[in-house]
Image: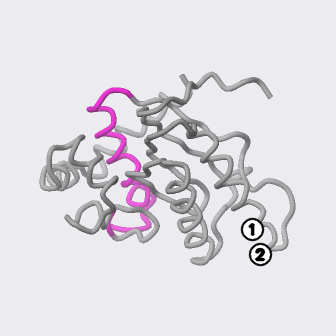
Amino acid sequence: MPRRSTIFQQDYVFHAMNRGAGKAEIFLADEDYLFLLNLMFSYAERMNITVPVYCLMPNRYNLLLKQNGEIPVNDFIRNTFSVYARWFNKKHDRTGTPFEGRFKAKFVEDDFFKQCLCGYILFNPVKENRVARPEDWKYSNARPLLDTGILEDSQNGFIHELFGTHEKFRDFMDCLDLETVLRMSGFSSYMLG
């Protein structure tokens, strides 16, 4: 496989995503989502990675990640999802990788783009008609992001740095609707560039 061109550095923010091989589901039960969330936050703490925004969908994941130390984001993703893949295969009596190749990661520098990405990631379940509002999807952090004081300090810090206050973040999310997010879907083509 060719070497990845993305440079992972301290204090950089990345959008990371992948989907199931052949668009197959990578989460088949509540237990799958919960196992991955526990695993992801355990590795994030050990590797000094902040996960300010995430959404797990049945056949894919979208993560906004901040690398706080020397350990690169790609090590975090590789460790987290290789352990998950082994666990998932054993639990569901499967073989082979559940994922469609290497994960995609894109460095996100512009603050406005980071803001849009927060909305894009959290609106995934609404876009697929799984829930009416982002905060109704239990496998994202939309609900705690929209409620002050529930998040870990690192997540609070990221949102405050990006939006100024939780109220401004809530106002931003309230201004989004499905039509806006669908227009932003073309915005995901930046992942290919």
Image position, residue 54 (x, y; %) = 44, 54
The reply to whether the C-beta atoms of the residues labelled 2 and 1 are less than 8 Å apart is yes
Q: Quadrant of residue 193?
A: top right
- Point out the stretch of residues depicted in magenta: 109-135
* Whether residue 133 is visible: no
Check disc 1 and report the residue beneath it.
Answer: 87
Quadrant where the N terminus sits is top right
- The residue positioned 42% from the left and 40% from the top of the image is 185
Q: Is residue 123 found inside the magenta-colored segment of the image?
A: yes
Q: Is residue 147 found inside the magenta-colored segment of the image?
A: no
Rounded to the nearest angstrom, the CA distance separating label 2 from label 1 is: 6 Å
Image position, residue 29 (x, y; %) = 62, 76
Q: Amino acid at mark 2?
A: Lys
Q: Amino acid at mark 1?
A: Trp
| SS class, disc 1 | helix
- The residue positioned 43% from the left and 41% from the top of the image is 66
- The residue positioned 46% from the left and 44% from the top of the image is 65
Left or right of residue 81: residue 141: left
In this view of the protein, which residue sits in the foreground, 93 or 9?
9
In this view of the protein, which residue sits in the foreground, 176 or 153?
153
Is 52 drawn above or below residue 72 in the view shown? below
Check disc 2 and report the residue beneath it.
Answer: 91
Image position, residue 78 (x, y; %) = 68, 46
The numbered dot on residue 100 is none
Q: How is the image coloured?
A: one colour
